[in-house]
Amino acid sequence: MRPRYFAIVPAAGQSARMGEPKLLLPLAGSPLITHVLRAWQRSRVGHIVAVIRPGDERLAEVIRTAGIELAIPATPPPDMKASIQTALRHILTRFSPTATDAFLVAPADVPGLSPGVIDALIERHLTGDKSILVPTIAGRRGHPVLFPWPLAAEVHSLSAGEGLDSLVRRQATLTVPCDDVAAGNGINPFADMVTPEDYRRLSE
């Protein structure tokens, strides 16, 4: 059986530094989150799961309209790690992944996410590499990151003060140069949008 690839979109943040729901801000004619979802949809991932806070109906409607599966926990996730853990439990229940499968993670506020970069990681994983795969452009690391499915258990074992970056540091990690495949929607594929200044820069 060929490996399956699951994309996780952690979209349960509160946009504290932005001051308003940033994932719904318009960017090039569409909500920011739509650019991220389209990138995943144009890639070779087979299933996309977005995690949102309970009661966030406006965001839920945008995501459902895009045809993306939602995982909504009973209580708001306190951080991105908790959102990813929610998605992993959802994937485990719905799809029963095997050791040959993998999951990919990128923040929900990276509107330049590149399908070419996503597919480059998948191509490398298909060679049988069991490392965590991190893309690079001009030597700089970015998103998404691909994790072999067996590491899902490690995500659930992270301590309260650890994020997925701790797992990346501990495990075998391979960087995948993506300079030749990074073309996307004209936005820097690794640029996230955290502050109003980021939004103004990306909107120019």
Image (cartoon, grey):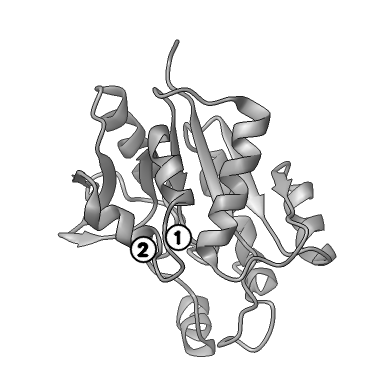
The residue shown at (64%, 65%) is 77
Q: How far is mark 1 from mark 2, CA to CA?
A: 7 Å
Front residue of 114/92: it is 92
Q: Residues within 10 Å of mark 1 (few under 14, many from 20)?
A: many
- 131 over 195 or under it: above or below: above
The spot of residue 204 in percent (x, y) is 48, 80
Label 1 SS: loop
Q: Residues within 10 Å of mark 2 (few under 14, many from 20)?
A: many
The residue shown at (61%, 36%) is 91
The spot of residue 55 in percent (x, y) is 84, 66
- Mark 1 and mark 2 in contact? Answer it, CB < 8 Å: yes
Query: Is residue 58 visible to the viewer in this orientation of the structure?
Result: yes
The residue shown at (61%, 80%) is 15
Look at mark 1 in the image and give the residue it sits on.
Answer: 112
- 10 over 103 or under it: above or below: below
The spot of residue 99 in percent (x, y) is 41, 24
Task: Tell me, for residue 190, which label it has, or none.
Answer: 2
Q: Please tell me in which quadrant of the rendered image residue 61 appears.
A: bottom right
